[in-house]
Each structure stands twice: as C-alpha cells, then as structure tokens.
Amino acid sequence: MRRILCLGILLFLSSACLPGIHSVSSKNHIDVPSKEVGESSLFTLSELEDLFPDQPASPKIDDPVPSPASPENRVAMRSLSLPISDESSDEFNLEILPGPPHKRKNEFDIPIVINEKVEHFLHYFQTTARNIFSNWLARSEKYIPFMREVLKEKGLPEDLVYLSMIESGFNPYAYSRSKAMGPWQFIYLTGKRYGLKSNWWVDERRDPEKSTIAAAGYLKDLYDMFECWYLAAAGYNAGENKIAIGMKRYRTEDFWELTKYRYLKQETKHYVPQMIAAALLAKDPEKYGFIGIEYQEPLRYDKVMVPPAMDLRLIAKACEITVEELKELNPELRRWCTPPDTPEYEIKIPFGKQDLFLKNFESLRPGGKTSFKNHTVKKGDTLQQIARLYSVELEPILEMNRLQKRSRLSAGTNLLIPLPKEREIKPGPLAPKPSVEKGRPSGSEEITYIIKKGDSLWSIANEMGVNIGALGAWNKLHPETKLMPGDQLKIKVANGDNLSMASRKEKRGREIIYVVKTGDSLWSIAGKYNVSISEIKSWNNLNGNNRIYPSDKLKLKVERPKS
C-alpha cells in the first residue's frame, strides 16, 4: 500500500513537470535531441506495467521518440501555452480598434479628465442644449478639417479645435456681449495683436482661416506661459493676466484647484469642462445618442487677386455664382465691395472656379482707371458738402455707396469717393458755404441755362464749372431745391475760362450707341467717354430714378473714347 501511494505521488509530479519542458522548448524554438526511454522516463518498464496493466507497453528503445518540433508536439505545446508577461496583468483589457491608429475616435492629444463637472456638461449637451449641439456638430465638419491642419502646422494639439466649438459653434458671424467676434471670438485688441484687421471694410476676426492662424499664435503663447493646456484654455477665455494673478494669489498651478475659489467667473470655471465634454461628444457622437446628423461639406476654395473697391456682384458674376455664395466664402467682407485701401485684395472663390473666373473677369470688369478716397463722415456733414469737397458729382457717390439723395449720414460712416486715377485730392476741412456774391464779378458774363429733365443744381454746377453755393445764391435757390424742366437759371461765367452749354455741345463729335455691359454704371461710362452724367441722362431721357442694365443701349455724343 505504501509503495502504491509513493508511485501515485511520483506519477502526479511527472505529469505536472513534463508539459513545462515542452512549453519551454516551444518558447525558445530549440530542437531537443532524442533521448532513450530510460533517460526520459521516471519509472521502470515493470513499474509502469504494474501501475497501468490495461495500457499498451511503452515504445522500445529502438523506436524513434517524437521530437518536440514534430507536428504532434507542436499541437500539444500550442494547446498548453499561456500568455506570459513581465508586467502585471491585473488591469489587462483587450479592445479591438478597427482602422489605422490615427483614426481612432477615442484618442486625444489634449488631456482628458472626466469628473463631476465634465459629466454635468456631457448631460447638458445631451439634454437641454441637444438641438444647439446638434447644429454645432453639423457645422463642425465644414471647418474642423482645415482648422486641424493649421493647428498641426503650428505644432499645437489638433483637438484644440473644440475651443472654437464652445466659443462660437463654428459660426463666423458669432458676436458676444463683450464684443468678441468670429469663430474664435477675438476682441478687437487681441485680434489686432495677432494680426487681424478690423475696420469699416473688413473684419478678419470673421475669416475662418486667418482667425485660426491668430488663435494658434495666441494659444501657443499661453501654453509657453503656463505649461498647461487647461490653464492656457482658461487664459484664452479670461485673459492671461487674470490667470497669472490667480495662480500667484492662491499658490497653485492646478486649474481644478483654482476653480474652487470665487476669483474666477463662472464662465471661465465652466470653460475647460465644456471643452472636454465637447471633444468627447464630437469624437464619438453615436455613443452619446447623436445619430443622423447631416454634416456640412468640408470648406474648400481657391484664391484670386482682384482690384480695390471691386463690386462683389461682378466677382460673383465672373464665377457664375450668387453674391450670397461669395459672401459665405468671405465672411470678413463687411461691405458690397472689396476694400478700397489696398492695391489688390485676395478673395476666396469656389474650389475649381479659378480658370472660369479669370476667363470671365477680364471681359466683365469696367474700363477706365479709377482711384478712391475713403471719407469718414463727421457730425454735420451732408452728401452735397462731401461732393463739393472732392469736386465730384453727387451721383457717383450715391451709386458707389448705394445711397439715396435723402439718405441720412451718421458720424463715423465711411464713404467711398470715386476719383479719376490721375487726380490727387488732399481734402482739408469742409469749407463753409460761400457768401452770396453781390453784382457781377470782374471779367465775367451772365448766361441763361434752360433746365432739362434730370438736371440738378449739382450736375449743372459741375458741368458749368461754377460753385454750387454761388449758383444757388444767383438764383435764390436752396441746394436741394427740385428743378423743373423748362425753368431758367442765371449763371455767371468768367470770360475765356468756361464755355457756354452751346459751345460745349459744339465740341461734341459723332453720336455713338453704347451697349451697357455687366458692371457698368453711368459714372463709369461718363468717365470712359469724357462726358458728364447729366449729359448722358439728357441724351437718353433718363431721370434720377432710372437704372441701367446690361444690354441697354445708350446714345452718347463724344469726341473719342479715353484710352
């Protein structure tokens, strides 16, 4: 009995140890040479026969012993092998992630902490603000791809794009109570510090590309200052000085610690949790119940250079798109034309339309060379005074600025004053109204002018080369008096310096028919053929309310076109 017990123990030990030998051999991939039965077994043949009388006898010594590398042993070793690691596997968790690593939704390049505050905004965006956040998601794919590229080029974490999501919902026209503007919500001074132009004509804070470049520069400076993306984000919201003073006052470099005090506004305390929540939701919206979002197409465009003060309608016509489509690509443009204060302006047009634009633009753009002056309206200015100041007719100013004669001007308004290229006018303060002239000036003569349909005091004064104030005084008329065809005006002209209307007409050569093209105006046609607007109106029976359209035909009496 004792012998049988000992043999059982030995048999158990043998069965426990032998597989380990195989597994080591398999692991090290070493071919072990064949051993004789006596060397490989712990028991004698007779002992085995006594223990296992119903089992076949062991192989003979001359029978080949299967090598550990044989197919049979390989199967055995694979079935017995266990995962072996030098590290603890207590937290081992296997997750199959489809697709290449850089496309995994749950990867972030900014620190992600999920705490009570983050969970609060996760719930808020899923419930109360669900519709708003759905709109943000739909708009996100339009801007995120190129914003990521800009951040990557600047060496910043690409997931900082979600700052723009909580700042504006990727809305270029977003405007806050603190007068912050655009997708990255720059205030005027900070935008100016990082190269964003903001004036009457353009506001580059609304330009998605330029404002993203500016935001990248600001965020980089903030990170260099705080060496923490949470503090940098808080500084972007509250200002770097606010965060720096708070860190010094409460002796902490931990954003979450800083939020425990009343020092920061609630908006800033919520800013980082909102950014984290937005990133989590936007990267895996289906996980949080945002299904069926109709994402907008990624923003793509070409860029072309156009002259200053170029009408957006003409640019849109050259691209064969609507003005609204053009404005959507260029939200920084605040007026109806490109800025007049730059030699050229780089404007964005739909992707793939560059060749079409260049082909159409040359034939559509109006002829003649023109320069412009930017006049800032002061309190008390009138359109008539401004026209007199620059020695131009009133009609071009109205047309260029899309105004009516009775339009009211507000102080600070900027007007575009069209001038011939060769003229340089350096206006001073608006001159006071001229005094009434008593009697006839020396060396002058008085002529009678018969008013025609479409005439005004301003057009007559400009055509005859006299002062509008003097013309009104000679005839006891207010500058805005409406003239009736057939009425007569007294005009005093200097001998030899001015020509009468009759003599001016005599100078006119042949009569031509001009076909109006897209982009033409009475002012541009008058400048091209060296005639006045009032003459064009008179020759074609036009009044102040008439507009010209492409393919209209106008009669002109000209000497020769300007080159």
Image (cartoon, rainbow, N blue to C red):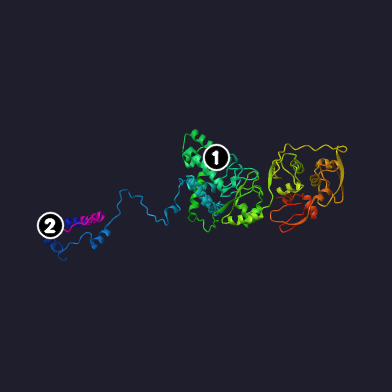
Q: Quadrant of residue 437?
A: top right
Answer above or below: position of 376 versus 316: above
Mark 1: which amino acid?
Ala
Q: Position of residue 58 (x, y in %)?
A: 15, 63
Q: Position of residue 48 (x, y in %)?
A: 14, 61
Between 326 and 51, the one lying in front of the other is 326
Residue hosting label 2:
3
Q: Main secondary structure of the magenta part?
A: helix
Question: Does 18 appear in magenta?
Answer: yes
Mark 2, secondary structure of its residue:
helix
Q: Residue at x 53, y 59 (%)?
A: 292
Q: Position of residue 237 (x, y in %)?
A: 54, 41
* Cα–Cα gap, marks 1 and 2: 87 Å
Mark 2: which amino acid?
Arg
* The N terminus: image quadrant: bottom left
Span colored in magenta: 17-37
Q: Nearer the viewer, mark 1 or mark 2?
A: 1
Residue hosting label 1:
238
